[in-house]
Image (spheres, rainbow, N blue to C red):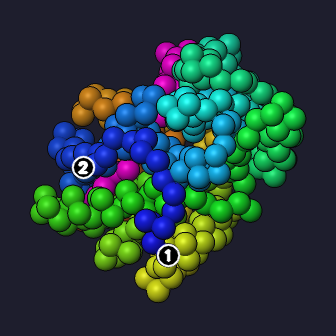
Amino acid sequence: MSLSDFPRVELAHKPTALEAMPNMSATLGGPNLYMKRDDCTGLAMGGNKARQLEYYLGEAVAQEADTVIITGAVQSNFVRQAAAAARKLGMDIHIQLEERVAGKDETYRTSGNVLLDKLLGATMHSFPVGEDEAAADAALEKIADDVRAAGGKPYVVHLGIDHPPLGSLGYVESALETVGQAESQSIRLDAVVLASGSAATHSGFLVGLRQGGSKVPVYGICVRRGAEQQLPRVQRRVREVAEMVGATDVVGDDDVMVRDTWLGPGYGELTPEVTEALEMTAQTEGILLDPVYTAKTMAGLIGLVREGAFGADENVLFLHTGGQPALFGYAQLLA
């Protein structure tokens, strides 16, 4: 099969820019840094989930669903963009917010993505656990049962590892887009650094690079779980995505690299390295990151540069997956 064999709807502004970061490169005194601007996908303030949702909601439309149901953290970018996508397609939306980050204040619970969820008219559900994907998905099925009982036709976006990674297809496409942009701009890419959480973006981008003929190393920076748990998760997703798009002969388990050096206490938790990455990127390039995914990933890139992982003349690509609305949920902590 190929990407064109899967149903898809148009949600994202594409192609997103591939641009240089000369000021940050000079500040770090290391390689030439570039950024793939998937924060600029357009849907409800942008972010990587727009690409993923094109395939999930493509299937939903094919199934004639009228309601989307999804789960995520309180400040989830995925549920915010799912709500926007559902509204754009004339569907109802139920979102379940998981308690993944302990001890957060009222600002965290009412501003940022939560504010946007409410503006989009989502029906909100709370789930008291933060690290039990199977239980969270099971709770979604109960919501789906209620929707059916009321005469609706629900489509559930599962995030657990035992469900097909349809959203990864959006990042196969993004990687192929990136390979083409680098060629047209005469940029020789030597490495990619990206966030590794659910593994949908990580696995899709890696498979897409290999399918597009690029053999560059992809550094997955852990943002939710440690490397010991994350490595087999990404490897499994890579195998599944490669099978979905007929690329099993170009990518394997050995292509997967993950680093948890910059994870800190866990998902959504700030560290000095995360704060430094937020400030450095803003103050050198005028680019905003988010505290949960991209700033932690940028902390990883900065750390890798300082470790000497890249040569001074190498070109390193950072995948900006968006998430800036979450900044407002962390306002007091960042202050």
Tell me if residue 333 is in the magenta stretch: yes
Find disc 1 in the rendering and name its residue: 1
Measuring from the top left, give residue 36's x and y in whole percent.
31, 49
**Residue 73 at x, y = what percent?**
67, 35
Q: Does dot 1 land on a helix, a strand or a loop?
A: loop
Labelled disc at residue 18: 2
Residue in the foreground of this view, choosing between 307 and 32: 32
Q: Amino acid at mark 2?
A: Leu
At horizontal 62% and vertical 19% (from top left) the residue drawn is 121
Q: Nearer the viewer, residue 126 or 277?
A: 126
- Answer whether residue 139 is magenta in the image: no
Above or below, 60 relative to 246: above
Q: Residue at x 23, y 63 (%)?
A: 180
Q: CA distance from mark 2 to mark 1?
A: 28 Å
Span shown in magenta = 314-335
Q: Nearer the viewer, mark 2 or mark 1?
A: 1
Residue at 58% over, 47% down: 61
Lateral position of residue 182 relative to residue 327, left or right: left
Q: Earlier in the sequence, mark 2 or mark 1?
A: 1
Amino acid on which disc 1 is placed: Met
Check disc 2 and report its element: helix, strand or loop.
Answer: strand
